């Protein structure tokens, strides 16, 4: 979990994520191996050492009527980029999706991440421009839950 957490921090730094990563290694461990796991991860290796990871979780489409997979994060350490490890990680997750009968493999990418976007286009992934991503977090999430009478 420590290595995976370190990679998450490195990814956030590489993407200029605003603020600090609040997840601790134990949070990652709970998400993957806790009483109610909510995600899965695969570690990419190079020369016998961890060099990257992909973390994903199940989704469901009411329109398609089938499960899917959301790729939350994919990261390859800079010294291993360009060697096919990112593609190998994507292939692995795509294989998991196919084995499970999923209709979709989806992910988000920062518009500024040109190398990743070029890779995704080479793999024939398409940008989904018919949807917008919205998020409730922090006080806005708590306020809406309060309106439903949800105890904090």
Image (spheres, rainbow, N blue to C red):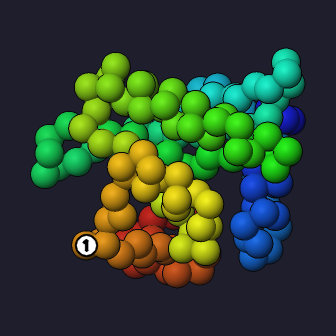
Q: Residue at x 81, y 50 (%)?
A: 78
Q: Residue at x 49, y 74 (%)?
A: 136
Q: Nearer the viewer, residue 6 or 112?
A: 112
Q: Is residue 12 above or below residue 132?
A: above
Q: Quadrant of residue 97?
A: top left
Q: Residue at x 28, y 32 (%)?
A: 102
| In-image side of 115 versus 45 (left or right) | left
Kindly state the secondary structure of the residue where label 1 is placed. Answer: loop
Locate the C terminus and report the quarter of the image it occupies. bottom right
Q: Quadrant of residue 14?
A: bottom right
| In-image side of 137 versus 102 (left or right) | right
Q: How many labels were placed on the picture?
A: 1
Q: Is residue 104 above or below residue 97?
A: below
Q: Quickly name the residue at label 1.
A: 130
Q: Residue 110 at what x, y percent from top left? A: 57, 69
Q: Residue 18 at what x, y percent from top left? A: 75, 76
Q: Residue 122 at what x, y percent from top left? A: 44, 50
Q: Is residue 146 visible?
A: no
């Amino acid at each position: 979990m420590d290595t995976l957490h370190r990679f998450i921090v490195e990814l956030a730094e590489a993407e200029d994520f605003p603020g600090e990563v609040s997840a601790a290694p134990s949070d990652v461990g709970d998400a993957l191996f806790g009483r109610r796991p909510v995600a899965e991860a695969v570690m990419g290796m190079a020369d016998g050492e961890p060099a990257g990871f992909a973390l994903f979780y199940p989704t469901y489409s009411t329109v398609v009527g089938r499960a899917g997979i959301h790729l939350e994060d994919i990261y390859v350490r800079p010294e291993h980029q360009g060697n096919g490890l990112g593609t190998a990680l994507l292939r692995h997750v795509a294989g998991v999706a196919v084995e499970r009968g999923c209709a979709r493999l989806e992910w988000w990418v920062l518009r500024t991440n040109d190398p990743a976007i070029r890779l995704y286009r080479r793999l024939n992934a398409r940008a989904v421009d018919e949807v917008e991503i919205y998020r409730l977090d922090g006080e806005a999430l708590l306020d809406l839950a309060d309106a439903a009478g949800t105890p904090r």
